[in-house]
Amino acid sequence: MITRLLYFIISLVIGFVALVFVVGIAVPKIRTSEITKEFPIPSATVWAILTNVQTYGEWHPDALNIQLLGTNDAGYPKWKQYSKSGSSETFEITYMLQESDLEIKLVDSPFNIESSWNYRFNSTENGVIVMLRQKTKIEGIFLRGFLTLLGSAHSNVEEEMSHLYEMATRVEKR
């Protein structure tokens, strides 16, 4: 009885490892996600939220706490973000053009993941249209497969944009 149970558990583990490997091979190393949303809010409000990295813990779906690390070589903010899962990663703004274009990069990840988020703004009569494009690169086959099975291989741009929209709406009502 115990031997069968042991074989069953070992078979499950081997099957899971094989599944992670196959998924890791099938999923591309680099993946891009994009979403566009119209905000009935002035672009300055949305811009202020995105460029004030200290407030990310208030609206970003994965940010629990932010530790400012100063500025990068271009003079833009650099910070460590502590996530709800317990990990921490270092980010920096790498490019910004006032209320038009903002790029944020993940510069230090415990899992050697590369990511960038590009926000583009297009002002309208009713507010602003924000386009978010995220590009993620995960080299490791097992990590890519495991994170894909967990549903966290690539951040959810829809969730991020939804949280940004909610925060902008709250700020605008103040």
Image (tube, rainbow, N blue to C red):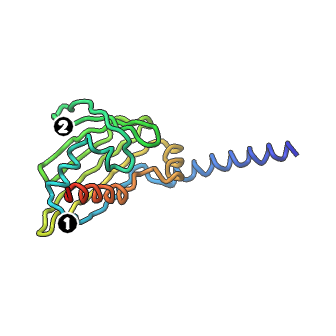
Q: Quadrant of residue 69?
A: top left
Q: Nearer the viewer, residue 142 or 86?
A: 86
Q: Nearer the viewer, residue 103 or 123?
A: 123
Query: Which mark, by number, is residue 40?
Result: 1
Q: Is residue 21 left or right of residue 98?
A: right
Q: Nearer the viewer, mark 2 or mark 1?
A: 1
Is 143 on the left or on the right of 155, as rendered? right
| Residue 76 drawn at (x, y percent) | 18, 37
Q: Residue at x 47, y 42 (%)?
A: 85
Q: Give coordinates of residue 33: x percent, y percent.
A: 35, 57
Question: Regarding mark 2 in the picture, which secondary structure is present there?
Answer: loop
Across and down, in percent, residue 163 comes to 33, 56
Q: Earlier in the sequence, mark 2 or mark 1?
A: 1
Check residue 76 in the rendering and tell me which mark sits there, or answer none. Answer: 2
Looking at the picture, tell me which residue is in the foreground, 168 or 1.
Answer: 168
Above or below — where is 125 with respect to 46?
below
Q: The residue tagged with tag 1: helix, strand or loop? A: loop
Amino acid tagged 2: Tyr
Check disc 1: other Cα within 10 Å, few if <14, some if 14-19, many if 20+. Answer: some
Mark seen at residue 170 = none
Image point 35% across, 34% down: which residue?
108
Residue type at the position of mark 1: Pro
Where, quadrant-wise, is the C terminus in this rendering? bottom left
Residue 79 horizontal side relative to residue 31, left or right: left
Q: Residue at x 36, y 60 (%)?
A: 158
